[in-house]
Amino acid sequence: MLRRYIACYALYLVLLPLSYGVFVVWSQAVLLIIGISVEEAQARPFYLGVGLLVIVFGLFFLVLGAEPYLRAGVARKELRTRFLRLAIPLVVAIVVGALAQDLLRSLGGPKTR
């Protein structure tokens, strides 16, 4: 039983760098989106702050809820399934964010004035 809990927390620790990867990729994507779509230079910091808050709070609550979710999966012998339910969307978010960055850069990157 102790092995399962060690595996649970090891998998939980894998979620932390995945979450950080999502933050890094999407914070850059938000910056590119704002640079391309917002004309008013003075409004850009506000939109960047809102975008970062959405990303940070979303990831914070995901990581906060992941520990009890995974721990409950130990008792039900669903640890792998529950971990994959959390990890796969994070990996997909990283890939989609990286593709979005490439697409946005090919559209011309941030406008300069």
Image (cartoon, helix red, strand yellow):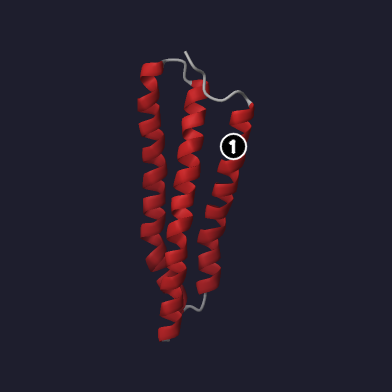
> Does residue 76 lie above or below 42 as drawn?
below
**Which of the 4 image quarters holds residue 66?**
bottom left
At x 47%, y 20%, the residue is: 38
Neighbourhood count class around disc 1 (C-alpha, 10 Å): few under 14, some 14–19, many 20 upward: some
Seen from the viewer's position, the closer of residues 44 and 113 is: 113
Residue 79 image point, x, y percent: 50, 73
Seen from the viewer's position, the closer of residues 25 and 60 is: 25
> Does residue 71 lie above or below 34 as drawn?
below
> Does residue 61 lie above or below 107 as drawn?
below
Residue 10 image point, x, y percent: 44, 72
Amino acid tagged 1: Ala
User: Which residue, given by chain and number where applicable, does mark 1 sit on?
Assistant: 100
Residue 20 image point, x, y percent: 44, 52
Q: Which residue is farthest front?
A: 112
Seen from the viewer's position, the closer of residues 8 and 25 is: 25
**Which of the 4 image quarters holds residue 4?**
bottom left
Q: Quadrant of the N terminus?
A: bottom left
Q: Which residue is farthest top?
A: 113
How many numbered marks have been drawn onto this rendered protein structure?
1
Q: Secondary structure at mark 1?
A: helix
At x 41%, y 79%, the residue is: 5
Residue 15 image point, x, y percent: 46, 61
Seen from the viewer's position, the closer of residues 1 and 48 is: 48
